[in-house]
Image: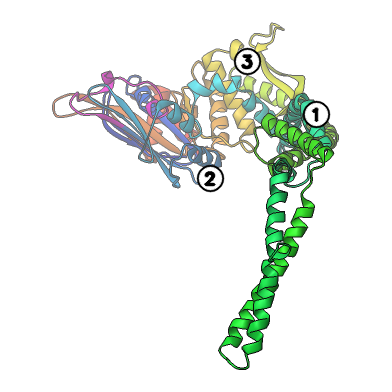
Amino acid sequence: MLQKLVINNYAIIDHLALEPDAHLNTVTGETGAGKSIILGALSLILGERADTSVLINKNEKSVIEGYFDVTNNDLFKQALSETDIDYDHQCIIRREIAVNGKSRAFINDTPVNISVLTKLTSLLVDLHQQFGHLALEDDNFQMEALDAIAESMGAVATYRLLYYKHKSIKQKLADMRERQSQWHKESGYKQFLLDELVAAAFKPDEIELADQQLKQMSHAERIISVLQASRNMLEEGEQPLINELKRINQQLQGIAELVPEVKPLQERLSSTWAELKDVAAELENEESKVSLDPATMNELQERMDLGYKLLKKHGMTSTAELLELQHKLEHELKATLDLNDGIEQLAKEEGTVYKELTAEADQLSALRKKALPSFIEKINELLTLVGMPNARFDIRIANVAPAPNGIDDVSFLLDANKSGQFQLLQKAASGGEMSRIMLCIKSITARALHLPTLIFDEVDTGISGEAARQVGILLRSLSQYHQVICITHQPQVAARGTRHFYVYKEADKTGRLSTKIKVLPQEERVLAIARMIGGEQPSEAAMSNARELVEI
């Protein structure tokens, strides 16, 4: 809701402040007093193009500020969050035009570009020049209006939950099928690689052990020669070392009782003898392991060749890496099978949710179609009342594929002159007619729809009498649920306002005229409306009529 509009140094406005109430605010004044200039200033904070021609004082910048209560405007709060602008229950929109022609815009003191400004302020203010065409070209607005009449908002919410659930499943299914397609292209080669590794059947560290064993076998004669020589020296030579140590040990043992200090030395020598005897046995054992079998060597060489071939093929350096690759391939191929199962299950779920979605869409469509005759009838009744007796309103619903709003494509149609030829509303209606049609639609749907501040600029142009009275009634009805600001020349409309603003020009000491605005108290309001009825010097009958209108 607009709490306050402040305009400084704009066109013929030095300074002006407008503080509308929450309901119907009517704005009147003589032609040329500056009503449209006020709207022009307001349009700047809504994102309209600016230029320096609007500056009264060419040495000072022009500043227009709008103060909005956005406490219950969840859409605006969400939009602020998406643009990283701080939220406060009061939002201040400011537009500045510098003397050099440059323009800047701010939301809660955060600089924003014009596209962001336009997007955000469209959630705060709806000028009839904008919504007269744009809203009716917006499929969402037409659908929301129809749903408001059909009281199908709950059904829409239920449908949308299913729609986005189905959309999410379809996307997930598409992603999985894409992966499946990719994996199918690779799975044959991966299976070949896996079969190759499985057939090789390498054991842990087998290639490294085979390499070591082959090296041993290629030097087998030298190894055996060294082992035999070492063992002979220990226990089989002319004077085996082990036998000599045994003899020395026995001799020392014989004098140990006579020389106690020898006892520890004898024990150490005894231990050395036992250790060397054990070494000789192990040397014999190692000698027996050394093989000279050509068949074994051939077998090891074949395993080595296969191993090195696979290592080179996969760019690896060890048996452990080959076994890890084998495990990875097994896991990936198993994942392919699991993916196939997952796709099958998800496809079943998608089919189930789609059935629920289409059933809900059919119910929603039925609610809308059921509400059509009543909605069309009400709009046509109101069109007659607001001065369009020859116009006929209609709604066309066509079936489409499931979309966020259902399976219905809604179009508002108009036959402006009982020609029997219906056209899209935005093509068939003039600007003034469009404003009145939108007033009719919004007055019917006001209770159910969230709407921003609505501004009607001379919505009553071209009508008078009963039609003007009906426009006033509709505006007052609409203002029970939304803030409305209406610039009007019709006394029947002006009298319906809950706050009446009067725009006028006033000369300063230099004689220069400036636009001013004031809230009219009751008696001044009656006089202003009487002047709208009977001219600058209204008769007593005009005054009486004005009092009657104001007191209605």
Which region shows up in magenta? Answer: 43-63
From this view, report whether residue 232 is shown above or below residue 191: below
Mark toward the viewer: 1 or 3: 1
| Mark sitting earlier along the chain (2/3) | 2
Q: Nearer the viewer, residue 188 or 261?
A: 261
Q: Amino acid type of disc 3?
A: Leu
- Could you classify mark 2 by the number of other residues whose Cα lies within 10 Å: few (under 14), some (14-19), or many (20 or more)? few
Q: Tell me the distance, in whole angstroms, between the alpha carbons under discs 1 and 3.
A: 66 Å
Residue under circle 2?
72
| Mark sitting earlier along the chain (1/3) | 1
Q: Tell me the distance, in whole angstroms, between the alpha carbons under discs 2 and 3.
A: 32 Å
From this view, report whether residue 448 is shown above or below residue 410: below
* Callout 3: SS: helix
Residue under circle 3?
425
| Residue 540 image offset from top left, x and y in percent | 40, 29
Q: Amino acid type of disc 2?
A: Asn
* Picture quadrant of residue 11: top left
Q: Amino acid type of disc 1?
A: Phe
| Residue 180 image offset from top left, x and y in percent | 77, 29
| Residue 112 image offset from top left, x and y in percent | 39, 32
- Could you classify mark 1 by the number of other residues whose Cα lies within 10 Å: few (under 14), some (14-19), or many (20 or more)? few
Task: Evaluate whether residue 497 shows in this view.
Answer: yes
Residue under circle 1?
192
Residue positioned 56% across, 18% down in the render: 434
* Callout 2: SS: loop
Magenta span: chief secondary structure: loop
* Picture quadrant of residue 331: top right
